[in-house]
Amino acid sequence: MKTTGGQKIKTGIFVLVAIGVLLLTIFMIGRQKSLFTNTFSVYANFKNVSGLQTGNFVRFAGINVGTVSDISITNDSTVRVDILLQTRVKPYIKSDSKASIASDGLMGDKLVQIAAGSDSAKLLKGNQVTGVEPMDMDKIMKKIELIADNAGAITGDLASIVGKVNNGKGSLGKLLNSNDFERSIQSTVESTNKTVQNIGKAAGGVSENMEAAKHSFLFKGYFKRREKQRLADSTKVADSIRNTKRGRRGN
């Protein structure tokens, strides 16, 4: 079976498209991995790299600026992480800049974050950046588990105590569930109400007695004198006010 000219053209187009997609993929990967940009190398030492792998991203101020080029064990307590950074961030890496290991999102891949450092610090000399140890998730999970166990134990104890009180066990349970205690509370409330009523009646009686005293012949003269004195005092005050006003008009 002979190949026609149309089939050759279609095959050629397919090959060209495949090559274009391949080149674009290589370019995008190379751009993310800083293969086509000027770079420089630094490194940081850690006791635990916490799942970091070669090729993971390096971020500065939230921007991908490089990749992890190598991870090697220096000794039994030190792991060296070599970092390849784009040259554009070199003026911002200071002598007090710090590298730390973080996660890309809540459950994402591990990455290295580089802090800028202080404004007064000098530019980094050499190629070592101070490494900050990542949080030990195993220790954190153990503490959370211990707190959860303690909370569960406390909740169980409280439930047991409440259950005993409801069932009338213990001094407090017997007191709260006792009929005598309920009757005592009710008697106290009734006694208080009666006392309040008696006070009200006593106050009303005093008011009535005062009114009756005003009309009694024994105290009638006393109250009349008090009333005359009040009227005289009111008259003096009124005269004083009028004289004051006249004096102001005369001036």
Image (cartoon, helix red, strand yellow):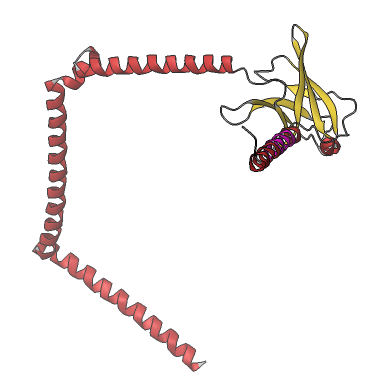
Look at the picture and state if 81 lies above or below 247: above
The residue lying at 77 percent from left, 28 percent from top is 98
Look at the picture and state if 96 lies above or below 201: above
Can I make out residue 105 in this image?
yes
Q: Position of residue 110 (x, y in %)?
A: 65, 25
Q: Is residue 23 magenta?
A: yes
Magenta stretch bounds: 17-28
Q: Viewed as shown, does residue 232 lie left or right of 168? A: right
Which quarter of the figure has residue 116? Answer: top right
Looking at the rendered image, the quarter that the N terminus falls into is top right
User: Which residue occupies the extreme bottom position in the image?
Assistant: 250
Q: Is residue 204 magenta?
A: no
Q: Viewed as shown, does residue 109 lie left or right of 249? A: right
The residue lying at 34 percent from left, 78 percent from top is 236
- Nearer to us in this view, 99 or 214: 99
User: Which residue occupies the extreme right position in the image?
Assistant: 125
Look at the picture and state if 21 lies above or below 138: below
User: Which residue occupies the extreme front position in the image?
Assistant: 1
- Nearer to us in this view, 31 or 23: 23
Task: Count every numbered label the image shows and give the total.
Answer: 0
Q: Position of residue 215 (x, y in %)?
A: 10, 65
Magenta span: predominant SS is helix
Can I make out residue 60 in this image?
no
- Nearer to us in this view, 122 or 186: 122
- Nearer to us in this view, 184 or 175: 175
The residue lying at 14 percent from left, 40 percent from top is 193
The residue lying at 9 percent from left, 62 percent from top is 216
Q: Position of residue 243 (x, y in %)?
A: 41, 86
Q: Position of residue 14 (x, y in %)?
A: 66, 38
Q: Viewed as shown, does residue 170 lie left or right of 66? A: left
